[in-house]
Image (spheres, rainbow, N blue to C red):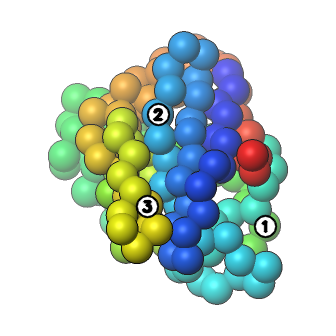
Amino acid sequence: MNLYLSRMGYGRDSTLGRISLGSLSFFSLEDERRDVKVPGYTCIPVGSYEIKLRKAGGLHKKYKARFPDLHKGMLWLQDVPGFEWVYIHIGNDADDTAGCPLVGELPVILPTGEFEIGRSTPAYVALYRKVIAALEAGDRVWVHIREL
């Protein structure tokens, strides 16, 4: 299974994109693009990353409590250069991501030129269900990140 994250808008502190998975489409939000990585404040490099489940850590415990019948592990992007523990997860603004792609249904363009996303939880649940189904079927899942 392949997800495509296409970055399309750049603010000083945020990056807006679109995540496509077959006929499903969501918005994404990441930290800003930088030439030199600043921990917690830089979007991940363009590239292709396999998604596996991570069943440890604080975020996993939080999501397991929040979604007990759904959550089977964090959607963990593998082998991201210069980053550890990169997940696709819920959030609305740049403060909610430390280099991780957030997913939502509504894009928000602020008067400052920064971006946020809305309706993150329903978008995450819909995306998560598809990814989990593929992983449980034994399929490999990849996210391909590109600049538009």
Horizontal side of 63 relative to 73 (left or right) equals: left
Label 2 close to label 1 by CB (< 8 Å): no
Which disc, if any, is residue 115?
3
The mark nearer the N terminus, 2 or 1, is 2
Local packing at callout 3 (Cα closer than 10 Å; few below 14, some 14-19, many 20+) is many
> Residue 110's spot in the image, x, y percent?
36, 64
Label 2 and label 3: CA atoms lie apart by 14 Å
Label 2 close to label 3 by CB (< 8 Å): no
Q: Is residue 9 visible?
A: yes
Vertical side of 144 occupied by 29: above or below: below
**Residue shown at the point (19%, 46%) measured from the top left:** 66
Q: Is residue 56 visible?
A: no
**Residue shown at the point (60%, 16%) measured from the top left:** 22
**Residue shown at the point (36%, 68%) measured from the top left:** 111
Vertical side of 144 occupied by 128: above or below: above
The mark nearer the N terminus, 2 or 3, is 2
Quarter holding the N terminus is top right
> Residue 137's spot in the image, x, y percent?
57, 14
**Residue shown at the point (39%, 46%) measured from the top left:** 107
- Nearer to the camera, 59 or 46: 46
> Residue 56's spot in the image, x, y percent?
43, 57
Name the outermost residue toward the front. 111
Local packing at callout 2 (Cα closer than 10 Å; few below 14, some 14-19, many 20+) is many
Foreground mark, 1 or 3, reads 3
Local packing at callout 1 (Cα closer than 10 Å; few below 14, some 14-19, many 20+) is few
Q: Secondary structure at mark 2?
A: strand
Label 2 and label 1: CA atoms lie apart by 25 Å
Foreground mark, 2 or 3, reads 3
The residue pinned by badge 1 equals 81
Vertical side of 49 occupied by 101: above or below: below
Which disc, if any, is residue 26?
2
Amino acid bearing label 2: Phe
